[in-house]
Amino acid sequence: IGIFHATLVSCLVLPALPALFAAPEGVVFGWSENVDTCGQSMFPEVDVEGRRVALAGLAFAAFIATDLIISGLHGMATLDHMVHHVAFLAAGLVMRGHCILPLNAAILLAMEVSTPFLNFMLLFRNRGAGFTLVVQAAGIAFVLLFVAFRLVLNTYGAVFLWQHRAVAMPAVVPDWQRWFLLAAVAAGSALQFFWFPAIAKIFCRGLAQLLADHTSPAATERGAPPAEHTALCTDEPPSPLAVSSGGVSPTMSVSSKASTTDVVGDADRNSHDGGAMPASEGLMHAPCKRQFCQVACRAESVLPRRRYGCRTQD
């Protein structure tokens, strides 16, 4: 569901961005009386773009509101997950309710372009070696799009809005909604930078493993454990970009929408699905570091410590 939703929003918004960037200030900081469609009757040259952004905004607001409620009821929403949803839901309701800021709304919605690749990676990463290449490609595409749209473009939109906050919204918007919207946009932008270090760390680790010659036949013949098993006894869990059948997996929300929090939290959570890697004979007797025991052997009822030969000593 998350893949289809993010794809729909992206297809609606991305074609509208060039026209809105080139639109006059009256459009960028204007508003529409047509609350049903947000059609730009005063600026017919961007009427189609305004309607597309408004439709995408409705779909996005309805989706994350549902996801927030379901995830909260089932205890699956983390703090950053809730901050993300509340911030963007609040911004979306104010923008869509008054049909204002079409450019900023399009920039915020354009961040969904990275979500299909994230969801695809999380869906297929534990399905065997046959999906390794497509999972790696999806992971690389996600990181590149994350940087381009969530860090660069979204930060530009937030700074642009704050610089023009005195004239950005019409008088029909109450002051408390005006400041709430400004705070929500700033918080949403800051959250992307909060997520990025963990994403970059996972990406760089996976890229290094891709470039390394860790699967040479000579090493395997000498009895060395496979690369994915070697990666387990490190200070960090294996990267989703490097091991498609890794021993850790995300906790996805009930609505099947994988958010960026799934990747960030993946470094701390333990998997209990069928994707857990079997232990090799050499690994059974090899002492693992305490950090790995905290990641892969945290739940003894799911992955017994003896399965990986984990010990409490370093």
Image (tube, helix red, strand yellow):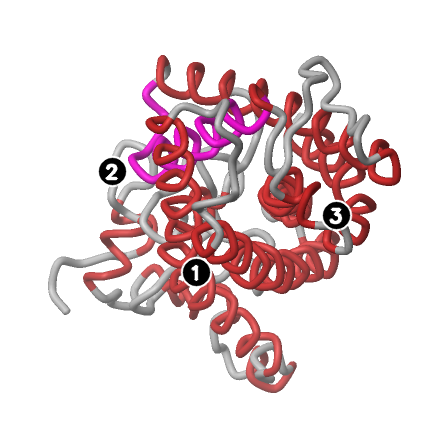
Q: Check disc 3 and report its element: helix, strand or loop.
A: helix
Q: Quadrant of residue 166?
A: top left
Q: Which region of the structure is painted magenta? A: 75-96
Q: Which mark, residue 300?
A: 2
Query: Mark 1 sits on what residue?
Result: 196
Q: Are marks 2 and 3 in contact (CB under 8 Å)?
A: no
Marks 2 and 1, how far apart in space?
A: 31 Å
What is the spatial separation of the Cα atoms under label 2 and label 3, in whole angstroms?
Answer: 55 Å
* Residue plotted at (73% across, 54% down): 21
Residue 125 to residue 30: above or below: below
Q: Which one is earlier in the sequence, the residue at label 2 or at label 3?
A: 3
Which is the main secondary structure of the residues drawn in magenta? helix
* Secondary structure category for the residue under label 2: loop
Mark 1, Cα crowd under 10 Å, few <14 / some 14-19 / many 20+, is some
Q: How many marks do you count on the picture?
A: 3
* Number of residues whose C-alpha sits closer than 10 Å to that of mark 3, classed few (under 14), some (14–19) or many (20 or more): many
Q: Nearer the viewer, residue 83 or 58?
A: 58
Instruction: Look at label 1 and name its amino acid.
Output: Phe
For residue 104, say whether it is visible: yes
